Amino acid sequence: MKIAVLAGDGIGPEITAQAVRVVQALGRHGLQVEVESALVGGAACDALGDPLPPQTLAVCESAQAVLFGAVGGPRYDTLPRAMRPEQGLLRLRKHFDLFANLRPAIVYPELAHASTLRSDVVAGLDLLILRELTGDIYFGQPRGIRRNEQGEREGFDTMRYTESEIGRIARWGFEAARKRQKRLCSVDKANVLETTQLWRDVVTEVRQDYRDVELSHMYVDNAAMQLVRNPKQFDVIVTGNMFGDILSDEASMLTGSIGMLPSASLNAKRFGLYEPIHGSAPDIAGTGAANPLATILSLAMLLRYSLEQPQAAERVEKAVRTVLRKGLRTADIAREGEQRVSCSEMGDAVVAAL
Ligand code: NAD
């Protein structure tokens, strides 16, 4: 088994270094995973003039999964679009056809205070949002800004999904639910949009193959409301690109701690790109203040979904829970008066807990 590690910019190298230590620790307990690092983003632009150099792509292709840190920073904001660090990430998603985006939102009891919602509403939350990532109104043609017959400017986009695109993400949703509490909620706007009426029809058809999973449908406006009213009612939510974009950000904020949230983007062959949802945090890069847990939890997802090592994944997640229970806190998740540990001290603690 092999993973490519693309640390990227800002805090990227600090946080991925801790995840690599976790891989090494698992190696001492019998899980042999080769790690190969490569440049991406601004770091790759600086060294090789390209945010995703061919040699980096080759390293990714030789692996089963990519562990990605973060890219970007103020230094690169004035570069032409094709040279921007985020192009490295977008090109990777496109190259590997990563259509399934998985975003868990977990509220650890110890960190329930970090949410802006009442702790009793969020404590113990464990929800997975599955967002289709390569279709929908973000990619549909035609699109543009034109002058209409009255001479007024008019913007237009096309919402479009084929049944095969809906079917494959629906299957992922049912599969994911099967590994959890067996409840899948499909979110659409079938009362208004034809595309999402098809979405609802296809998800319902796919259910025939997953009779053990309970399926419900919810309109997106209600889902947005239910996520803040009673988020614990959900197990897995599956939805299209645009609704997923918005709902997954809403769900991540239920937890209140950006440094804790992992994500995965997968293709049909289970090749995946795993990354924390946060960015490169240039404001704290190099200070040792970064929280590496989102990256370590991304590694756990990598072990579960791409390397199919659920036990190793559980061990890593359990180790994270242990360090939180012991009271270890990086600055972003510490309350006033609580002692703070550095990025590498948090890594030390997770390795020890493993
Ligand atoms: P950000 O997520 O980098 O930072 C937002 C805030 O959260 C900052 O105050 C930061 O210090 C804090 N933070 C983020 N991650 C943290 C961690 N692990 N531990 C502790 N604190 C953490 O978002 P931003 O400031 O809007 O963007 C900074 C750069 O990152 C930009 O160049 C942006 O384009 C890029 N970005 C990259 C990705 C990615 O690589 N996938 C995603 C989002 C933003």
Image: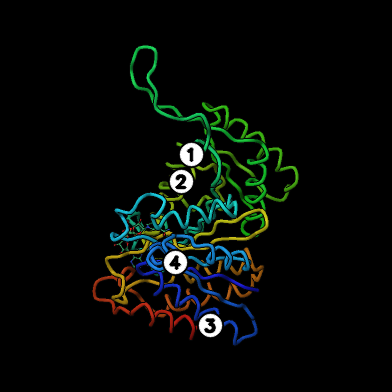
Q: Which of the two labelled residues, at mark 2 and mark 4, occupies the earlier sequence position? A: 4
Q: Is residue 243 above or below residue 311?
A: above
Q: CA distance from mark 2 to mark 4?
A: 20 Å
Mark closest to the chain's N terminus, 4 or 1: 4
At 53% from the left and 53% from the top, the residue drawn is 93
**150 versus 167 height, above or below:** above
Q: List the residue tagged with mark 1.
A: 138
Q: Residue furthest front?
A: 49
Of labels 1 and 3, earlier in sequence is 1
Which of the 4 image quadrants contains residue 2? bottom right
Q: Are marks 1 and 2 in contact (CB under 8 Å)?
A: yes
Q: What kind of element bears circle 4?
A: strand
Q: Is mark 4 within 8 Å of ligand 1?
A: yes
* Residue position marked by numbered label 3 in the rendering: 354
Give the amino acid at mark 1: Tyr
What's the amino acid at mark 2?
A: Asp
Query: Between marks 4 and 3, how big is the CA–CA gap?
Result: 22 Å
